[in-house]
Image (tube, helix red, strand yellow):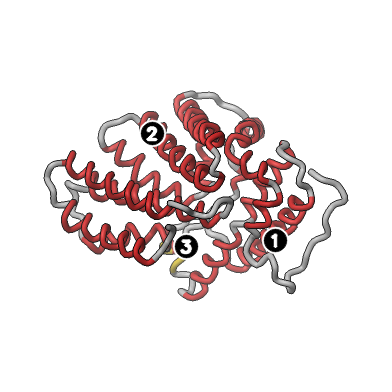
Amino acid sequence: MALSLPILIGWLVYIIIAYYCIYSISNILTRILLILILCLSLTYLTCHNLPVLHLSSLFIVAICWLTSIRLFHLIIFSKNNSLTFKSYLLKLLWIYFPIQTSISVKNQWSIIFSIILIIIKLLMSHWIHRWLINCDRGISFERIVMFYMSIMTTSYAIDIQVILIRILTRDKYTMESFTNFPIFSLSIREFWGRRYNRITNTILKESIFQPLRSQYLSPTISALITFIISGLMHVHVAFIIFNDLSTLLPTFCFFFLHGIACCVEANTNMQFDEHVRWVLTHTFLLITAPLMIGPFIKEGSLFLKLNPPPLFDNEWIPKLPLPNFCP
């Protein structure tokens, strides 16, 4: 059914009912059941019959999950706090418009440097995309690396929005970026916590990890539960995009293994040189990556042609020459 007008109205009505009706219920079990039933029902209706192999389906499923997670947090775990309707709406709207003050962002690049970086990412993203289409040779570690680079460079689409907001507000406001140079990660915790998919990370941290910690659970258990829920979300994404049950277990295992890795890092005191830490981190990422992105690569050029990066077909954008070999 996807994002039809009735579905959008249904989500809007649900958000209002959740605050004015469900939030006021004193029995926590009743609140949990009502939130879960309504979230699951609306998510099912929204994601039912989404197009296979389209990235738009990925975003719709992710938005449904993140909205549901945020709603569950606000209605269930904020019961003892003074939650106004304005702050409630702003928390939900942040999922779609992750705007924040510039002074709250540490080590923000200058606008000029960011524009240069956008141009580099754009050219690289288009170049990698064309190269992968021309080299449809199944799953290999080389193609996994290229696909990973494609994901990292495609973030220029969000970077453009960030720059526009900074320019329009005279650098008073900015928007949460998608990535922060994941290639520099020196641990799995740093990769997921500060470098990659920062918007989703912020929501999961604020709406799952921190509430669980406030319920006197250990950081290790809270982190593992967060990764498990993230894994379930990506399992749903994989099912909708590929309509293939064989992709579900590997997808979940990817996030479960990374959750275990983060817990091990947090509870061990292994001291390594930065270069060793970098090698260990990215070796682990490379070894486990086929579990998650293998299905995308397996679909090959069909998936890539259906999901070109933004501005891919614009003639005015220079096209870098392709190598005469395949990764």
Task: Tell me residue 151's x, y (percent).
Answer: 62, 51
Dot 1 lies on which element?
Answer: helix
**Sequence order check, earlier mark of 2 and 3:** 3
Residue linked to disc 3: 175
**Sequence order check, earlier mark of 2 and 1:** 1
Within 10 Å of disc 2 (Cα), the crowding (few <14, some 14-19, many 20+) is some
Outermost residue toward the right in this view: 324
User: Hey, what amino acid is under mark 3?
Assistant: Met
Residue 36: which quarter of the image?
Answer: top left
Q: Is residue 126 above or below residue 69?
A: below
Residue 284: which quarter of the image?
Answer: top right
Which is nearer the eye, 39 or 197?
Answer: 39
Residue linked to disc 2: 225
Quarter of the picture holding the N terminus = bottom left
Dot 3 lies on which element?
Answer: strand
**Residue at the spot 13% in from the left edge and 48% down from the top edge:** 25
**Residue at the spot 39% in from the left edge and 44% down from the top edge:** 205
Task: Indicate which disc residue 120 carries.
Answer: 1
Quarter of the picture holding the C terminus = top right
Within 10 Å of disc 1 (Cα), the crowding (few <14, some 14-19, many 20+) is few
Dot 2 lies on which element?
Answer: helix
Using residue 1 as the reference point, say whether residue 285 is left or right of it: right
